[in-house]
Image (cartoon, rainbow, N blue to C red):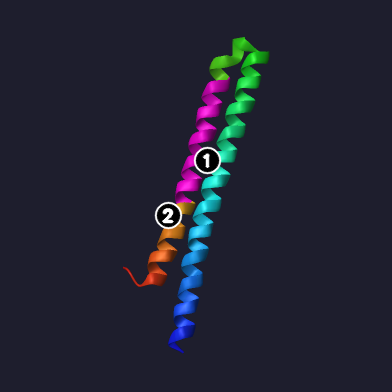
Amino acid sequence: MLTLILLTAGYALMGAGIGAGIVAIGAGLGIGRIGGQAMESIARQPEAAGKIQGAMLIIAALIEVVSLFAAVICLLIALNIAGIS
C-alpha cells in the first residue's frame, strides 16, 4: 500500500515538473512569435511603430502573467503532493 502511495506521489511530482516545462516552452514560443510578427509589422508600416510596440508589450506581459500563474500552480501541486505545506 505504501509503495502505491509513493508511486502515485512520484507520478504527481513528475507531472507537475513536465507541466511547468510545457508552460515555459509555450510562453517562449508565444513571445517569440509576437516579437517576430511585431518586427515584420514595423518594417512594413514604420509610422505605426509606437502603436505596434505598445500592443506587443501588453500582449507579452499578459503571456508572462498566464505562464507565471501556470508555473505557480504546478509548484503548488508538487509541494502539496510532497507533503510540504
Magenta stretch contains residue 85? no
Give the number of the disc on residue 72.
2
Residue density around tag 2, few if under 14, some if 14–19, many if 20 or more, within 10 Å = some
Check disc 1 and report the residue beneath it: 63
The disc labelled 1 sits on which kind of residue?
A: Ile
Q: Which residues are magenta?
A: 52-69
For residue 66, above or below residue 75: above
**Please, which residue is most extreme toward the top here?**
47
> Does 63 lie within the magenta span?
yes
From the viewer's perspective, is 36 left or right of 83?
A: right
Query: Residue 68 location in percent, x, y?
Result: 45, 47
Q: Amino acid at mark 2?
A: Val
Q: In the drawing, does residue 22 fall left or right of residue 69?
A: right
Q: Residue 53's x, y, as percent?
A: 54, 22
Q: In terms of depth relative to the viewer, which is nearer, 58 or 83?
A: 83
Could you tell me how far apart the alpha carbons at marks 1 and 2 are, in whole angstroms? 14 Å
Residue at image coords 49%, 53%: 70
Q: Is residue 79 above or below residue 46?
A: below
Q: From what the image shows, is residue 63 above or below residue 48?
A: below
Considering every residue shown, the one lying at the far right of the view is 44
Residue 58: give x, y in percent of width and height: 51, 31
Q: Residue at x 61, y 11 (%)?
A: 46
Q: Quadrant of the C terminus?
A: bottom left
Which residue is drawn at the image coordinates 57% and 28% (left, top)? 35
Q: Is residue 59 above or below residue 3?
A: above
What SS does tag 1 mark? helix
- Say which label, 1 or 2, has the lower sequence index: 1
Q: Residue furthest left?
A: 85
Callout 2 secondary element: helix
